[in-house]
Image (cartoon, grey):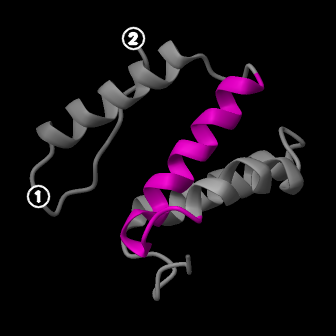
């Protein structure tokens, strides 16, 4: 499977990439650990699912390392989805502080 033609088609993809790099640079996981989780997943999908698989791999690493629980991930996902639904098209999504 090859990476998408354009590296980032949406802002969230660039943010996800930057977040992954920042976590690696902070010592939360090695690139070898990343490759062992992401590699097998990405080989089984088309380019249209590349960033979804990237996201899923990062979530698995965060959960496995104890950085975020499945409940933390689910709660944050729900907050983002609610914020996206409440945001007019073309306006940046603002995620308020956790409640």
Q: CA distance from mark 1 to mark 2?
A: 25 Å
Quick check: 33 above or below 82?
below
Secondary structure at numbered mark 1? loop
Q: Return the residue found at the far left.
A: 88
Residue numbers of the magenta segment: 43-65
Mark carried by residue 63: none
Any magenta on residue 80? no
Any magenta on residue 50? yes
Residue 56: percent from the left, percent from the top?
52, 43
In which quadrant will I find the C terminus? top left
- At a point 61% along the width and 45% down the height, the residue shown is 57
Name which of mark 1 and mark 2 comes first in the sequence. Answer: 1
Quick check: 9 above or below 24?
below
Residue 52: percent from the left, percent from the top?
44, 54
- At a point 71% along the width and 47% down the height, the residue shown is 37
Majority SS type along the magenta span: helix
Secondary structure at numbered mark 2? loop
- At a point 88% along the width and 54% down the height, the residue shown is 32
Q: Quadrant of residue 35?
A: bottom right
Q: Is residue 52 left or right of residue 78?
A: right
Mark carried by residue 89: 1
Q: Residues within 10 Å of mark 2 (few under 14, many from 20)?
A: few
Residue 7: percent from the left, percent from the top?
52, 80
In which quadrant will I find the N terminus? bottom right
Q: Which residue is mark 2?
A: 99
Q: Residues within 10 Å of mark 1 (few under 14, many from 20)?
A: few
């Amino acid at each position: 499977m090859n990476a998408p033609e354009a590296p980032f088609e949406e802002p969230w993809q660039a943010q996800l990439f930057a977040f992954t790099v920042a976590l690696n640079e902070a010592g939360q996981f090695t690139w070898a650990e990343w490759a062992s989780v992401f590699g097998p997943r990405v080989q089984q999908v088309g380019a249209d699912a590349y960033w979804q698989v990237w996201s899923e791999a990062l979530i698995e690493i965060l959960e496995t390392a104890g950085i975020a629980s499945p409940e933390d991930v689910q709660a944050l996902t729900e907050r983002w989805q609610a914020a996206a639904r409440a945001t007019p098209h073309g306006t940046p999504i603002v995620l308020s502080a956790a409640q």
